[in-house]
């Protein structure tokens, strides 16, 4: 063990040198940050204001995602963690998070706990109730888009987006397909990305209990069966592109190109495609994000995204806690979301509405639709991605569902096999 610890420490020091990092001054808070867009640039600006107001220096080190994904875990294990980091893998740092609640006011802690999804906060709590080790700073949420122009051309009335079910959108999309498809070109009614992640939101909407009270996966529930049967019906009736779920060779597949090319009426994917659609559809047709359909389980997508976390190794716990309290405040959270064009995980921010800083009205409209989905998320929908055994579900679900779609397994056999896959993977991971 001693040799391993020394080796990890040596690796960490070498990685820090290669990456251009130097040890911070003892009174400086270090923040390791990766960005998909402008997130870390905005943090740098916001924290410069924080420094002016408090005198607490914060250094934002902007790094590639690979640094956070591959190098940071080694450095944390070796005892050479930065004070804070922007992360996506929560379980790997269990036991290593700082509890900021010990260093901030009761009012700040209460707002933090109230405004962010409990399952995600719990994933950064070291298993201690009420502990605050970090917060999700930007959400992704699964949900559907529609091609409004196709509906208009087909003369098909749009269902009421606030009350419509998946059955309603299926029927409406099928009418569009029937009206507009030709021998030369098929317009498809509806499609869903080939992944258990995208499948989970509609299944939960239909009443699936995918994660039970013990945090374990239970796939054979009525809502999960109902969504599987609806997806199967899409294929049997030829209203969905067969190549997405059946012809993808067992890999994750999507229908992005079909939607961008104007051949798809209803598309279940997620908020991460907003920028893609805004840029690549342009004025070719009118498109929109719509609320997740209603069902026995309400209306929910599935959450994903990044979080800002603090590590217990810090020499400056009080200062780090103050930084986190500042970033979780409603005013700062709102500015961050508006400037980065992201979905705020802060429910107070999401419910208050956002004025996104872009001139593309389609992007603004879609962001606002998805932002309104955040407060509606079921607890299990927020907990799915941070569940320590999510890998077991994701690794096997799409393949087992596909076996049902192509007739290799009955639905009962597919769900039983999927549950066994998950149970075996969990057992292997916990031995």
Image (cartoon, grey):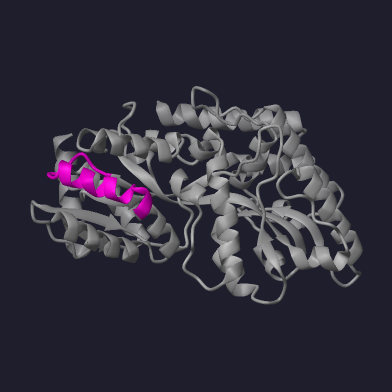
The residue located at (28%, 45%) in the rendering is 325
**Of all residues shown, which one is farthest toward the bottom?**
283
Q: Specify the quadrant that holds the N terminus.
A: top left
- Residue 323 colored magenta? yes
Q: Is residue 312 left or right of residue 412?
A: left
Query: Residue at the location (73% across, 38% down)?
Result: 227
Q: Is residue 123 something one can see in this rendering?
A: no
Q: Is residue 174 left or right of residue 281?
A: right
User: Which portion, as a residue range, is magenta?
Assistant: 310-331
Give the percent coordinates (x, y) of residue 265. 77, 60
Residue 179 visible (yes or no): yes
Instruction: Name the quadrant containing residue 135.
Output: top left
313 or 394: nearer the viewer: 313
Residue 31 location, quadrant: bottom left
Seen at 50% across and 39% down, the residue is 382
| Residue 60 shown left or right of residue 162 in the figure | left
**Residue 248 colored magenta?**
no
Task: Assign the C terminus to one quadrant of the image.
Answer: top left
Residue 97, image x, y percentages: 27, 38
């Amino acid at each position: 063990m001693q040799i391993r610890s020394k080796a990890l420490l040596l690796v960490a020091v070498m990685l820090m040198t290669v990456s251009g990092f130097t040890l911070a001054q003892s009174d400086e808070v270090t923040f390791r940050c990766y960005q998909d867009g402008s997130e870390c640039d905005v943090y740098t600006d916001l924290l410069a204001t924080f420094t002016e107001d408090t005198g607490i220096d914060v250094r934002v080190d902007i790094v590639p995602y690979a640094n956070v994904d591959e190098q940071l875990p080694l450095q944390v294990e070796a005892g050479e963690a930065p004070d804070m980091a922007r992360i996506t893998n929560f379980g790997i740092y269990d036991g290593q998070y700082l509890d900021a609640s010990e260093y901030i006011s009761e009012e700040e802690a209460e707002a933090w706990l109230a405004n962010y999804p409990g399952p995600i906060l719990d994933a950064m709590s070291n298993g201690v109730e009420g502990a605050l080790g970090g917060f999700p700073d930007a959400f992704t949420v699964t949900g559907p888009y529609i091609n409004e122009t196709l509906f208009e051309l087909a003369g098909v009335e749009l269902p009421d987006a606030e009350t419509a079910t998946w059955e309603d959108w299926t029927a409406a999309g099928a009418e569009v397909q029937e009206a507009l498809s030709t021998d030369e070109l098929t317009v498809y009614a509806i499609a869903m990305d080939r992944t258990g992640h995208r499948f989970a939101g509609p299944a939960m909407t239909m009443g699936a209990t995918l994660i039970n009270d013990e945090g374990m996966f239970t796939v054979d529930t009525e809502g999960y069966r109902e969504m599987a049967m609806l997806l199967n019906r899409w294929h049997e009736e030829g209203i969905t592109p067969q190549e997405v779920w059946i012809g993808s060779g067992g890999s994750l597949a999507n229908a992005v190109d079909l939607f961008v090319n104007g051949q798809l009426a209803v598309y279940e994917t997620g908020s991460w495609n907003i920028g893609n659609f805004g840029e690549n559809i342009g004025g070719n047709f009118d498109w929109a994000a719509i609320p997740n359909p209603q069902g026995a389980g309400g209306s929910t997508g599935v959450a994903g995204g990044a979080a800002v976390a603090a590590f217990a190794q810090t020499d400056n716990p009080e200062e780090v806690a103050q930084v986190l309290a500042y970033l979780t405040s409603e005013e700062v959270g709102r500015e961050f979301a508006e400037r980065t064009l992201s979905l705020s995980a802060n429910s107070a921010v999401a419910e208050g509405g956002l004025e996104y800083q872009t001139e593309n009205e389609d992007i603004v409209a879609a962001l606002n639709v998805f932002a309104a989905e955040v407060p509606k998320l079921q607890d299990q929908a927020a907990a799915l991605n941070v569940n320590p055994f999510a890998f077991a579900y994701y690794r096997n679900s799409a393949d087992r569902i596909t076996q049902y779609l192509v007739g290799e397994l009955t639905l009962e056999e597919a769900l039983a096999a999927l549950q066994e896959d998950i149970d075996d993977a969990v057992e292997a991971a916990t031995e």
